[in-house]
Amino acid sequence: MGFLSVRYKPSQEKIEAASRLYRDINQGRMPQTPLLQRINPFKNITVKGRVISVVSLLSVALLLVGAMGLYGMNTANKNLRTVYQDKAAAVSELRQIDKLMMQNRLQIINSVVTPADAAKNADEVERNIARISEIWKGFSQRPLSQEDSGIAQQYAEKRGRFVQEA
C-alpha cells in the first residue's frame, strides 16, 4: 500500500487510482500486497529481533570462513609433510653419504701421507662404508622419479667401484 502527497495537486491518473482503492476498501476488498512483502520474514519482527538475526547470520558466516581456512591449512600441512618426506629427508640422507665419502677420501689420503696410521684409517673407512651402505639402503627404498632413479643407479655403480678399490 502506498501513500499520496497532498502538497501539490495530484494528476487525474492518481485521483482515479485513489478512487478505485477507496472503493475497493469500502466494498471489503483489500488490495493485494506484492509477493515479496507477503513472504518477508522480518515484517513482524522487532528491531531487536532483526539485529539479533543479522548478528547470528554473520557469526555463522564467520565460523564457516574460519572452518574453511582451517581445512585449507590442514591440507597444506599434509602436502608439505609429503614434500618433506619425499624430498627433504632424501636430500639429508644424500648429504650424510657425501660427508662420509669425503671422510673416507681424507682417511685414504692420511694413510698415504702417514703410513703408521693406515690401520686406524682403514678401520674408519670400513665403518663409514658400512654406515653409507645403511643410509643408501634406506634411500633406495624411497619412491624416486625416473630421472632421480637413473642418477641413483649411476651413483650405485660408481660407489661399488669405489668400495672395491678402497
Image (tube, rainbow, N blue to C red):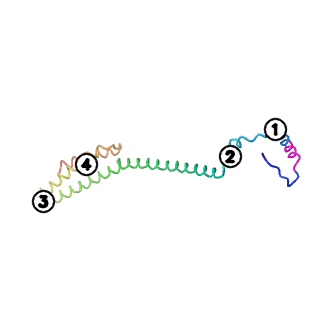
Callout 4–callout 1 Cβ contact below 8 Å: no
Tell whether position 102 is magenta: no
Q: Earlier in the sequence, mark 2 or mark 4?
A: 2
- The amino acid sitting under disc 4 is Ile
**Reading the chain from its start, which is encountered first: label 1 or label 3?**
1
Which mark's residue is nearer the viewer, 4 or 1? 1
Residue carrying label 3:
117
Few, some or many C-alpha atoms within 10 Å of disc 3 (few <14, some 14-19, many ≥20)?
few
Question: Does the magenta segment cover residue 13?
Answer: yes
Q: Nearer the viewer, residue 75 or 138?
A: 75
Where residue 88 sits: x, y (%)?
Answer: 34, 51
| Element type where label 1 sits in the image | loop
Q: Which residue is mark 2?
A: 44
Tell me the residue that label 4 is attached to.
135
Mark 3 or mark 4: whose residue is earlier in sequence:
3
Q: Where does the magenta region start and end?
A: 10-19
Between discs 4 and 1, the one toward the N terminus: 1
Distance in Å between CA atoms under marks 2 and 3: 98 Å
Earlier along the polypeptide chain: callout 2 or callout 3? 2
Residue at mark 1: 28
Q: CA distance from mark 2 to mark 4?
A: 75 Å
**Looking at the picture, how far across and down is residue 100, in whole percent?**
23, 54
Percent position of residue 18, x then y: 85, 45
